[in-house]
Image (cartoon, grey):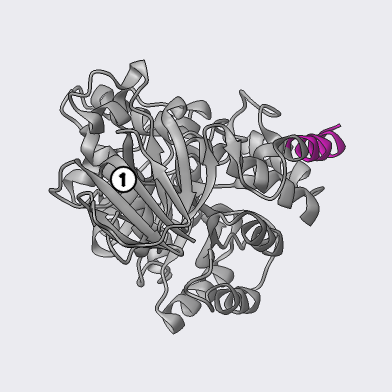
Amino acid sequence: MNTRIYNVRILTMEAGKSIFRGEVWVKGDTIAYVGPSVLDAKEKWDREIDGQGNLLMPGFKNAHTHSAMTFLRSHADDMKLDEWLNNRVFPAEAKLCEEDIYWLNKLAIMEYLTSGITSVFDMYLSKPATLRTVEDTGYRMVICESINDFGGTVREVEDDYKRYNQDPDRLISYQLGFHAEYTTGRPLMEELAGLSEKYGIPVYVHCSETKKEVEDCRRRTGMTPVGYMDSLGLFRQGGGIFHGVHMDDADFDILKQRNLYVVTNPASNLKLASGIAPVKRYLDMGIPVAIGTDGPASNNCLDMFREMFLTTGLQKAICDDPEAVPAMEVLKMAVVNGAHAMGLPECDILAEGRKADMILIDLQQPNMQPLQNIEKNLVYSGSKQNVKMTMVAGKVLYQDGEYNLGSSKEEIFARANESARRILG
């Protein structure tokens, strides 16, 4: 489908480029033109969308989530992380089947779309169910492997790496990862390090989320989780850590040396009382930061606007510095850095040849007025109410409260509730 989106303000997210008025052309799943309005265009369009002066920009990237955990939303709140995980989450997840995960993924995607999130880095169970979700909805998902001592082999991981990365134009892709140091023994981690070396691929992992995690690792190994995993060769090809809240000085040096991304999850870390990640120090050292929501069991909201505000607001408070982590830096984390952390460089900005993953932001809402600085409005006062349209790979999946996911809203809600009732009683 060829689509023209005109009469819009455009934020390309290219470095140093300001918002301008113009139009964007989409051919298939790719952006064909971004620039001033072309009055004498002779192109044939399947659809033309009048943006009515609103803002068109690249979609947000949720760089860490567990989508199908929607069934656990508000089920096990106000608990410590280790108790929450071992006593409530793991036992419930053991009862999931592929059909559950398919519908629970769809519920999460509905929420992603209303928050302007066009792709997610999803670390969860059942890759076949995730593939089916992607094929049926047209949504873009990057699988982050979550192997650990409780399931999976490195041979299976290698097969999945080949299987899910065989077509560069596919909406699904795959990155190497494992759950965490505390759920994964040294032999398995060393095997994964070998696989990373074999293919030259990065590794991603939950890391240094709580003080207890760091203290336990130091007691077992004499090192922090970052130091221990690096000593096993896991970070030689780059990658990233999810959370990165409790860090030693040497940990920062390793992250910098290995060109690792840190994906901060401020709402989840606050709710579980895990702490506040040192985002300002990461940025001061040139360590790239992306933003994730974490799963809907620990957040419980899949809302990038809330994450952006918390990312900057918490740093200003703990650093006693109102200039810490400015709005444009946060917007870059949520859009450009997220794309690069997830292995989606073709989705980072609005430019010719990039994938048509974009959102239309309603500026005709009180929280966006006056239009003195639209970028800062997005971070400091923006909300889901401002997302008018979400397009993924050139296809409009959400517009003005209506979804285009191959299933009705009512069916998705009903199926998700059925799963939750059966599993949780």
Residue drawn 32% across and 33% down? 54
Above-or-below relation of 147 to 11: below
Above-or-below relation of 350 to 77: below
Question: SS class of the residue under badge 1?
Answer: helix
Residue drawn 52% across and 74% down? 165
The amino acid beneath tag 1 is: Met
Res. 275 visible in picture: no
- Which residue occupies the foreground of this view, 225 or 170? 170
Circle 1 residue: 333
**Quadrant of the snapshot with the C terminus:** top right
x, y percentage for residue 48?
Answer: 42, 48
Residue drawn 44% across and 65% down? 203
Q: Specify start and end residues of the magenta stretch as a single range.
A: 413-425
Residue drawn 65% across and 34% down? 84
| Magenta stretch: includes residue 420 | yes
Direction from residue 224 to residue 105 in the image, left or right: right
| Magenta stretch: includes residue 121 | no
Examine the residues drawn in magenta and state their main secondary structure. Answer: helix
x, y percentage for residue 324?
Answer: 19, 31
Above-or-below relation of 360 to 219: above
Query: Farthest residue in the left direction?
Result: 16
Q: Where, by quadrant of the figure, is residue 422 drawn?
A: top right
